[in-house]
Image: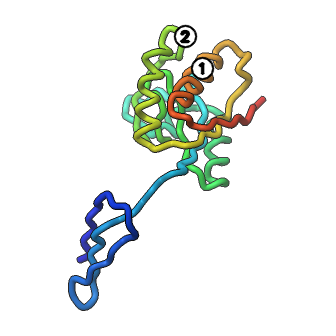
Amino acid sequence: MNKLTLLPALSEPVLERIDGSEYNIKYLYCLRSHMKYICTTCSKEKRHDKALLPANQRYISGRISFVISESQRLSTSLLILSGKYGLIDVEREIPWYDQKLVAGDLETLVNILVKQLQDKQVSEIIFYGRSREIPDWKPYYDVLEQSCRQLNVTISYVYLS
C-alpha cells in the first residue's frame, strides 16, 4: 500500500522506499501559483426538485450550458456565482432556492467570496456574462470585482448576448 503524507515543504518531493515495490512520498512540493477558473452567474430558472441537485443540473439556462461546454473545451474548472452561496463548483449539490443578488447584499457576499477565492487559491477568473449595463447583472459584476480586487485576482470578461 502506498502511503501519502502531505507536508508543507520548500523542496522537491522526496521518495522513500518502504519495501521492494512501494514508495512513501514524504514531502510534496505543490505550489498552486496559478489557479484559473471560468465563472458565470446562477440563473433564476431552476429545477424545482425537492432533492439536492448538482448546480449544473439545478440551474436551467442555455448560458450555463454553454459555459459548461466552454470550461470542458478549455479544460478549466467552472464556478457559478450564486447570490445565496457565493462561488460554487458545478458539481456541488444545492437545494432549490430563490435569492437574487441585490446591492444591499454586496458587503456580506464580498466577505464570503474573498474566503472562497482564498480557499481555492484562485489567481485568475474568466467571467462569462451578459452586459453589466443590464440592471440584474450589475451586482454580480460588483461583488466579483470587489472580491478579486482585495486578493489581486485577475478577471477577464467574455460578454454574451
Q: How far apart are marks 2 and 1 (CA)?
A: 9 Å
Q: Is 66 situated left or right of 16 in this image?
A: right
Q: Nearer the viewer, residue 102 or 10?
A: 10
Q: Nearer the viewer, residue 152 or 46?
A: 152
Count of labels in the image: 2
Q: What residue type is labelled 1?
A: Asp
How is the structure coloured here? rainbow
The residue depicted at 40 percent of the width and 29 percent of the height is 95
Point out the image quarter for the C terminus.
Answer: top right
Task: Using the image, determine if residue 107 lies above or below residue 81.
Answer: above
Residue extending furthest toward the right: 161
The residue depicted at 28 percent of the width and 60 percent of the height is 7
Q: Name the residue under label 2.
A: 103
Q: Name the residue under label 1.
A: 142
Q: Is 40 situated left or right of 118 in this image?
A: right
Across and down, in percent, residue 136 comes to 64, 15
Q: Mark 2–mark 1 contact, CB under 8 Å?
A: yes
Q: What residue type is labelled 2?
A: Ala
Across and down, in percent, residue 144 comes to 56, 27
Q: Is 105 situated left or right of 42 in this image?
A: left
Q: In which quarter of the image is residue 38?
A: top right
Across and down, in percent, residue 77 comes to 55, 48
Q: Is mark 1 on a helix, strand or loop?
A: helix
Residue extending furthest toward the bottom: 20
The residue depicted at 51 percent of the width and 42 percent of the height is 122
Q: Nearer the viewer, residue 55 or 110?
A: 110
Residue extending furthest toward the top: 104
